[in-house]
Amino acid sequence: METHDGAAAAGDSVLDFSRLSLTTLSLDSMSDERKRDTRQLYLNYNRLNLLPSSVSVFCNLEFLDISNNGLTAICEGITRLGKLKTLLAKNNRLDEFSLPKEFGSLQLEVLNFSGNRFEEIPLQCTKLRRLQSLSLGGNRLKSIPAEIEDLTSLELLYLGGNLISAIPPEVANLPYLSYLVLCDNRIQSVPPQLTRLHSLRSLSLHNNLLTYLPREILSLVHLQELSLRGNPLVVRFVKEMTYDPPSLLELAGRTIKSRNIPYYPRDLPSNLLLYLDLASKCPNPKCAGVYFDSCVRQIKFVDFCGKYRLPLMHYLCSPECTSPCSSNPQSDAESEDESSVPADRLQRVLLG
């Protein structure tokens, strides 16, 4: 078996050039057959500043590890690796300007850019339609682009250890997302749209700025782990928060929806049809009301598995509407029935 400059060959399909203090990669002495047979290439723990364009000669490459170098850019040649499924590029000096324009044309399934200098998620990454795992932890990200919703095959999204202040509702449009890691950021609230993440099993939100959670989180039926430690969660009942009276438009919309008045696309302009589709049902089972933009916000506590009490935000249609769990609205100890979150469903709630 042919190797190159002391590289370890673990098999016909694996080339290991790791920990060789390489500053460049010369493959002149390597046979065409060896290049063609290589499926995995390890270049991690070297001194590469640029990913050499010579990697493009490995036409059947499926796995590439270029972690722990000093990389500031990834060459255009990587876009010729049509069979590449896994790219590990942790702990380098890469940023949003380091990727080739056609990076999104790759057929990647796993991409790890953790420990770099990204301030934005490159839009090329959001074009990786087959991507199942995306890791950008330990960077300088300040936001998550709405285009994240284009990664419809994504199962794991790791964005811990950044400067993210908000979760865009578009994250909820990832049908297969099972693991969402947003710990160690600056997130102040969780959008209720996350209830659409029907595949979500683990949600890591520890070490953020959360004071409450949306009530809709109870609808995540497959959620097994919820990590919340290190957040300034409220510790007492807040009876009532701000309420803006509904507009005439909202009053009309509420009447149509609550009384089930029939209407048809030919009857109304498109903007009003869209508005009526945005109606939210009041969570109080004794209330048949709906709301659009105007609602009463209340924080209630829910017992998780009989052990943990978490503050959840409720949205009620009016101040006169009693919350579905208000046995004593003045009590600081007010909580939901603990059976609302079965112990066999939510296996771990990490608060401390």
Image (cartoon, grey):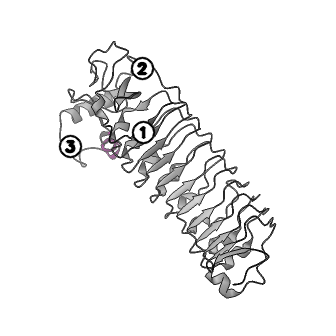
- Secondary structure, mark 2, is loop
- Secondary structure, mark 1, is strand
Percent position (x, y) of residue 229? 52, 32
Amino acid on which the number 1 mark rests in the picture:
Arg
Up-down relation of residue 162 to residue 64 (above or below):
above
Q: Is residue 297 visible?
A: no
Mark whose residue sits in front, 3 or 2: 2
What range is drawn magenta here?
A: 268-275
- Secondary structure, mark 3, is loop
1 or 3: tag closer to the N-terminus: 3
Residue 157: within the magenta?
no
Up-down relation of residue 213 to residue 111 (above or below):
above
Cα separation, mark 2 vs mark 1, equals 33 Å
Amino acid on which the number 2 mark rests in the picture:
Thr
Mark whose residue sits in front, 1 or 3: 1
**Image position of 267 (left or right of 346):** left
Up-down relation of residue 145 to residue 18 (above or below):
above
Please name the residue shown 40% across and 41% down the image: 193
Please name the residue shown 40% across and 38% down the image: 192
Mark whose residue sits in front, 2 or 1: 1
**Residue 40 picture quarter:** bottom right
Cα separation, mark 3 vs mark 2, equals 33 Å
Please name the residue shown 39% across and 43% down the image: 224
Identify the residue under disc 3.
Answer: 263
